[in-house]
Every structure is written in structure tokens, then in C-alpha cells.
Amino acid sequence: MAISEEEFKRCMSAWPSGVTVVTSCAGDTIHGMTVSDFSGASLTPPLAVVLCDRASLTTRMISEGGCFGVSILSVEQQEISDRFASKKLEHVRFEGIEYEIGQTGAPLLTGALANLDCRLTATHEVGDHLIFVGLIESAEVRPGAPLVYWGAGYRKLEDEAD
């Protein structure tokens, strides 16, 4: 017998992760959501993987538009993470947010620690989520500290040099 949803959530809260906003477009419409299930998948070719809830508007846009952007958030971008996670703000997530359009058409958030612009290469169905694999067409990295989520809250990394 599989564990309960509550047990699963409790176990996963022990895993610290970076925080990203995954974005996409379909035609002239853009959308995005906060995602912690992101990873690099391959060096050659350079691939990224994101896991997205099937019910999300962003998931539909990735499927329809064939692209996605990943913005790895800095510690200063907690408000952006909260906004892109909120169902109440789903239709106004980009209002007042600075972004650029990547080569693929996916929006990339300004000020993120890193932005990856990905062309969708594969989709896999798993439970209530879809796994999207994307070829990283372009990437940009900036200095700074990452926004980290652990134990049901945001955390700061302590610099070992301090």
C-alpha cells in the first residue's frame, strides 16, 4: 500500500530545494508558476526537466507552445515566488513583473540568478503531473544567493566563509 499524501508531503519537506518560476507561451498568451521540481538532466545535449501539475494553465501552455523558461530565483525574489504560486493571482502573475522574451518565446524573469530558455523535446505522464524535458537553447547566470525552500518555508543559505 502506498503512503498517504500527508506522509508524502512530510517526507518531501525534508528535501531542501531551489525555487524556480517556470514560464511558457501559447500564441500571444504567457503564463508561469512557481516550481521546485526542476533539474538538469543531461550535459550532451544540455537538457532540463520540470514536473508540472496536469491541472495548471502553465502545463497546458508548455504542451501547446512547445517551450518553457526556467528562472532560478534569488533570495530577493520571495515575493515573486509567492505571486506565481498563488491561485488567487493566477491571471495577473506577470503584472508589474519585469521579464524578457527568450528565443523560444518563453518569458524569462529579470533579476533571476539564472534563466534557461528551453525547447520542449519530450513529455512523460506520471501520476497527477507531467514531466517536461527541454533542450536548453540559451542560458544566462548572474551572481547572488538562491531562494531555498525547506521544511515548509523559505530559508537562507549560510556562507561557509563567514
Image (cartoon, grey):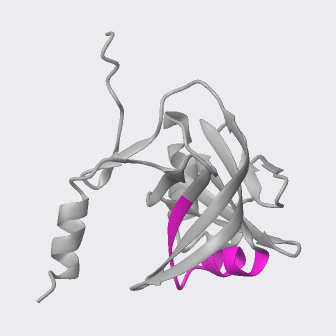
Left or right of residue 64: residue 46: left
The residue positioned 50% from the left and 45% from the top of the image is 78
- Which segment did they paint magenta? 49-65
Q: Quadrant of residue 158?
A: top left
In the rendered view, would you say 57 is above or below 103?
below
Coordinates of residue 27 in the picture (x, y in percent):
87, 76
Total marks placed: 0
Given the current orientation, which residue lies at the most extreme right position?
28
Closest to the observer: 19 or 84?
19
In the rendered view, would you say 113 is above or below 90?
above
Q: The N terminus appears in which quarter of the rendering?
A: bottom left
Coordinates of residue 77 in the picture (x, y in percent):
55, 42
Given the current orientation, which residue lies at the most extreme left position?
1
Given the current orientation, which residue lies at the most extreme bottom position?
1
In the rendered view, would you say 161 is above or below 18?
above
The residue positioned 25% from the left and 61% from the top of the image is 12
The answer to if 63 sits in the magenta stretch is: yes
The residue positioned 64% from the left and 62% from the top of the image is 134
Coordinates of residue 152 in the picture (x, y in percent):
28, 56
The residue positioned 54% from the left and 37% from the top of the image is 74
Q: The C terminus appears in which quarter of the rendering?
A: top left
Given the current orientation, which residue lies at the most extreme front position?
44
Coordinates of residue 114 in the picture (x, y in percent):
62, 39
Closest to the observer: 39 or 47?
47
